Structure formats: structure tokens, C-alpha cells
Amino acid sequence: MTKLEKAKQYEKEHQLSEDQLPAFHYAAPIGWINDPNGFSFFDGKVHLFAQYHPYNNQWGPMHWLHQTTENFIDWTLEGCALAPDQDYDHAGVFSGSAIEKDGKHFLMYTGVRKDENGEFQQQCLAIGDGKNYEKLKNNPVIPTSLIPQGFSEIHFRDPKVWKEGDRYFVVCGSLDEKGQGQAILFSSDDLMNWKFENVMAHSKGTFGSMWECPDFFELDGTPILMFSPQDMRAKGLEFHNGHNSVWLTGPFENHQFKDFTAHSLDYGLDFYAPQSVLLPDGRRVMIAWMASWDNPIFKKDFDFAGQMTFPREIWMQEGKLMQKPVRELEENRINPVHLSDIKIDGTFKNEKIAGRCSELIIRFKETQNLSALILGLAKSEKEEFESTLTWYTHQNLLEFDRTWSGMTSDSNAIRRAKAPEGGIQEIRVLIDRFSIEIFINDGEMVMSNAITTPIFADEIEIETIGSCKADIDFYTIQTK
Ligand code: FRU
């Protein structure tokens, strides 16, 4: 049996039941996932692959998991797509991306190889029909011999491919000769023969170490590079995840950022390695691994570990990168509850507003008498489970706290972040069995968090110090 057949058989035999997995977030049928890979539109469907180790809930020899969707809510398991079964990738089929060419689906990934001379990361191709994929005979297509002398051969990974006119481009994460992070660019006419172009952007020692999972695109006319710098130092209330995810823009010429400013993509505890896709209808959608290398909360009694964020439409508005749940979510809302002009002065609870596969929207009408608002989620009074989002209005500070979410350790249970400068007009929350994602002001700011709270803890409660007036909408999310 090949390694791929073995993985496919294992996942079939060990597949978890639906109620053990997230309800409307991408996760593995069994085992571990990290980064989203190959996010693409092919043959009428959205395809999303992931770094995958089916055999237990820990990172291990990397495979690619494959699932497809037509609504971003229900994912169809296509199964393991790639296994580490070749000389050039036996130590791991690492992250990468996908593109369509001549009616075929091309997957570009990092093949990791180890031998007596050390470890090498090189970029490889697999070609398929949306179901089955075959690795190219003459892999790697971007061997380490194509990178300038001195650049690391061990830290050279995560190719993101796109097309401009007739030419293909690939950006990879890399370390330069001083061990500083950078994003490097290659180009090709046919996806097979590549040449080194330039260093698209360089950390200059200020943005962490290795830059993982770069993604380049134009968003409403602005050139954007997203990437995940490892070991980044926190600044004020930003960049507290150790390994962080940021976006940058700045003066851009000949595919190079001459200078840049960078910002956090997410202010929660769990967000890494985002990747985007351009859909045929013009939307750019981003998804990320909703976990953190430095702070994994799925512990030994889980048969799966790792899940993706809910996919988000992204766009530029007044120099900010905005993100909100893809609009398909709205088509899957059921059992709506609408309360208008509610005065909250103390504790607010409503028996219809509860659930662990749901969406809550609070639109503030009056907040001048509000000192703090504490939103209790995935809560059970009796058992004392709860995660909270607190908005301290005077300091304009947000605090997410999952200390009582069912974790076995308090480390990194709290995340504080500055709320948007203009204050908060709307809080929108997606609550799933294993996550709480918080969207502020129609996409100005997001906090993504994983939780491991028992499913029966489904209450929602609002508490205020002072009072406010708001409209509240609540929905259950319908899944297949
Ligand atoms: C990011 C990352 C990538 C690598 C993959 C390995 O989370 O470290 O750089 O390709 O995970 O699983």
C-alpha cells in the first residue's frame, strides 16, 4: 500500500462523527491540521487543502488534506491528496497553493528532504483534476540552486502562485544570509521553468525571524503582502501571538516594496498562516489556521486538533484591511431573533438567544452611559463555563478571556486589544463548538479564538456597568 492509500484508508476507518467536529468550520476528519493550503476555485467549486497529519492530534510528517465547498459552510471531504512519498519530499509535503492551467489543477508545495548534507526545502508541483493529483516527474521545479547564494536552503518554503497577464509568479518565505526574514519572488511562463526575480519585501531585522506563508495580491488597487513572521516581538497591545500574521503595504515598484508599514491581521489568540483566493465574482476571500503554535489548546483527549477560521471577504477601506464573514453565511441563517431598542442596564439574557452554532449581532444605539460591557459566551451558569468579551469604553479597550472555557491551563487565556479609534458601533460574533470569532464594526477589527468548552455550555449573557441601548440579532447557522 502506498503512503497515500494508507492515509486515505486511515481517515476512512477513523473518521469522527459530525458532532465531534466544528459545525461550520473546516477541520480534519481525524488528526491534526495546520496551515490552509491550495485555496482556489476550480471546476465550479472552492477547494481548500491543509497541512495534515491524520494519525494523531500532533504535528507529524506532513500530508495535504483536501476538502471542497460550494457555500463555505459545508465542506465535502475529498480525502488525503498528497503524502510524503518521494525522495524530494519524504520529510514533509509542506504548505503551498494552487492554480488552474489548461483545465488542470496545479498544486505547488514545498517538498522537504533530509539527507547527510542537511535539510532542503524546494518547491514542487502536483497536477490533478480536482480529485486525484500526481506529482510531477521532474520535481522540484524550484530547486535550492535557483536561489541567490547565501539564502537559507532550509528555510525556503510556502509558495503562493498567481498569474499576471501571461506570466506566473510565486512568492516564497525565506531567510537571507544574515538569518533575516524575507519574501522572495520567482516567475515562469509555464509553471515548470522558473527564474528568481527579486526580494519582494525584507524584514530588516524588525519583523520576527522567518517569514512563513507569504501571499501577495492587489486589493482594491493596493498591493498587499500578507505573511506570518515567526518569533515576532510584541509592540504595545499588538503582535502578542509569538508567531504572528500581518499585512503590509507601501511604495511598490517592479514587484518590490521599497518601504512598508505592517499591521496585525487579527487580534485574537488563534490566527496563523492566512491564505487568500480570488473568486470568479471578484471577491477576495481569506482563511487562516485558527490556532497558535505557541499556545495549542487542543489537548490529548481530542481526536482532532486544529480548525480554520470562518472564510472572510477582505477589502480596503480608508487604508485599512477590512474582513467580514463571507456573505454565504447570511443565506444559512435560520430561526432569527430580532430585538430592537433594548435597554441593557445590568444583566441581559433571553432564552431564545443561546447556541453553539450561531451568530450574534449587537448594534449599539446609545453608549454614552456605558462604562463596560461584558459579553458572556459559551456559558453555563451551573458548571461555570464561560468565555467573555469585555469592552471597557473609557479606555476603549477590548479583552477576550477564555480562562473558564474548559482549558487545562491558564497560560495565554486572555488577549487585550485596542478597540477601533472611533469606538464600537457593532459587535458580531460567530460561535461554533470550538471557536469564537469576534468582528467589530463591520470588519474593522477581528479577534479569532479557539475554545474547548463542553457543548452543553450554550448560554449567552450581556452584563453592563452603566447602561446602553442596542438592537440585537441572533441566528442559528444551518448546516447540512
Ligand atoms: C507554518 C508552517 C509552514 C510550513 C508548515 C509545515 O505554520 O511552519 O511554514 O510549510 O507550517 O507544516
Image: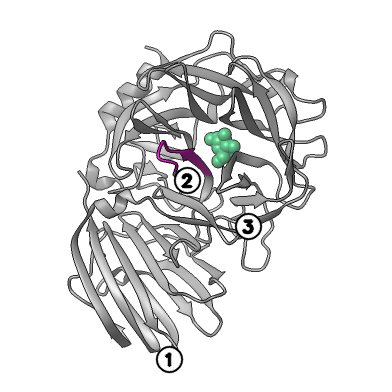
The amino acid type of the residue labelled 3 equals His
The amino acid type of the residue labelled 1 equals Asn
Q: Which residue was labeled with disc 2?
A: 286
Which residue is the extreme one toward the top? Answer: 137
Secondary structure category for the residue under label 3: strand
Q: Which residue was labeled with disc 1?
A: 369
- Tell me the residue at 37%/81% (across/down): 365
Query: What is the distance, in whole Å, between disc 1 and disc 3 at their CAs?
Result: 32 Å
- Tell me the residue at 38%/30% (across/down): 66
Mark carried by residue 44: none
Q: Quadrant of the N terminus?
A: top left
Query: What is the distance, in whole Å, between disc 1 and disc 2 at their CAs?
Result: 37 Å
Residue 243: in sight, yes or no? Answer: no
Q: Quadrant of ligand 1?
A: top right
Q: Residue 303: give x, y in percent of width and height.
A: 34, 42
Q: CB at mark 2 closer than 8 A to ligand 1? A: no
Say left or right for 12 vs 275: left
Mark carried by residue 263: 3
Say left or right for 411 vs 24: right
User: Which circle's residue, 1 or 3, is located before the other in the chain?
Assistant: 3
Q: What span is in magenta?
A: 274-282
Closest to the observer, 8 or 247: 247
Q: Residue 147: give x, y in percent of width and height.
A: 75, 24
Quadrant of the rendered image containing residue 455: bottom left
User: Which circle's residue, 1 or 2, is located before the other in the chain?
Assistant: 2
Q: Residue 390: give x, y in percent of width and height.
A: 44, 76
User: Which circle's residue, 2 or 3, is located before the other in the chain?
Assistant: 3
Secondary structure category for the residue under label 1: loop
- Tell me the residue at 27%/27% (across/down): 12
Secondary structure category for the residue under label 2: strand
- Tell me the residue at 57%/20% (across/down): 124
